[in-house]
Amino acid sequence: MKVMKFGGTSVGSADRIKDVAGLITGRGQNIVVLSAMSGTTNTLVEIAGYLYHHNVNGAKEIINSLEKKYMRTIALLFTGVDYRMEADEEIRGIFSHLRSLCRDGFGEEDEKEILAQGEMMSTTLMYLYLQQQGVNAGFLPALDFMRTNEDCEADSEYIRDRLEELLAENPGADLYITQGYICRNHEGKVDNLQRGGSDLTASLIGAAVDASEIEIWTDI
């Protein structure tokens, strides 16, 4: 089993997502780690900045603009009505969640929740696109296995044990999709591995599953 990590530029458009899907299909039962689509994390940081400065309307305007970008991507990715509707519903749900965080008392926990949504969206789109193409992809939610301890370091034993359990639940998948960057802390709250953390995610997964190789794709 290999771990293949693709950065934001590699999944930065509908065409790039299609290209990555072609690269990862038929190469074995590997785990594919995805960053957020290029530009998304910066936009989410900008949204959080507006909310720290109590500019809810400004934050919502940016959210609306970002949502339109994702709706365009969905229109280009999905030819089948069922998959397009499912992608639309999933992504709109994430944007509804972002809007729910536009409130008074915005704090660090809210910011980390916002920053996690980029990877949630990129992996959702890739997973559904693979399904549309007839690929039996498995989904490994990073928030279900990636965790840091009280010292803010990777909880390697927990990661290994949880990944083993999750992989055993879907042993027949052609490949597995998961998120880079995001995790939970020792209290179970949404956190992240800092900017560039997707590479660390790939390394931690590689160690946990005794991967034969870890491939870091910065562009395609």
Image: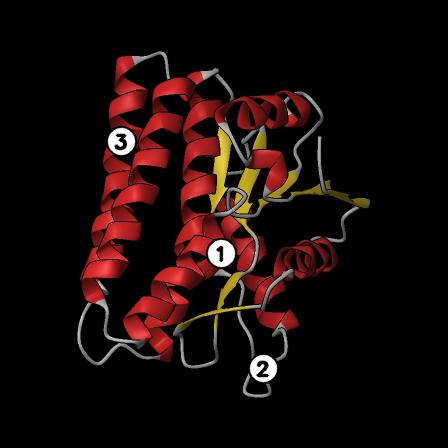
**Contact (Cβ within 8 Å) of mark 3 with mark 1:** no
The residue under the point 72% across, 58% down is 203
Quick one: SS at disc 2?
Answer: loop
User: What amino acid is labelled 2 in the image?
Assistant: Cys
Residue 208, position in %: x, y? 69, 59
Please tell me which residue lies in front, 192 or 4.
192
Mark 3 to mark 1: distance in Å?
A: 22 Å
Above or below residue 127? Residue 134 is above
Quick one: SS at disc 1?
Answer: helix
Residue 78, position in %: x, y? 38, 18
Mark 2 to mark 3: distance in Å?
A: 35 Å
Q: Nearer the viewer, mark 2 or mark 1?
A: 1
Q: Which residue is mark 1?
A: 42
Quick one: SS at disc 3?
Answer: helix
Residue 88, disc: 3
**Contact (Cβ within 8 Å) of mark 2 with mark 3:** no
Q: Circle 2: is it few (<14), some (14-19), or many (20+) Cα within 10 Å?
A: few
Q: Which residue is mark 2?
A: 152
**N-terminal label among 2 and 3:** 3
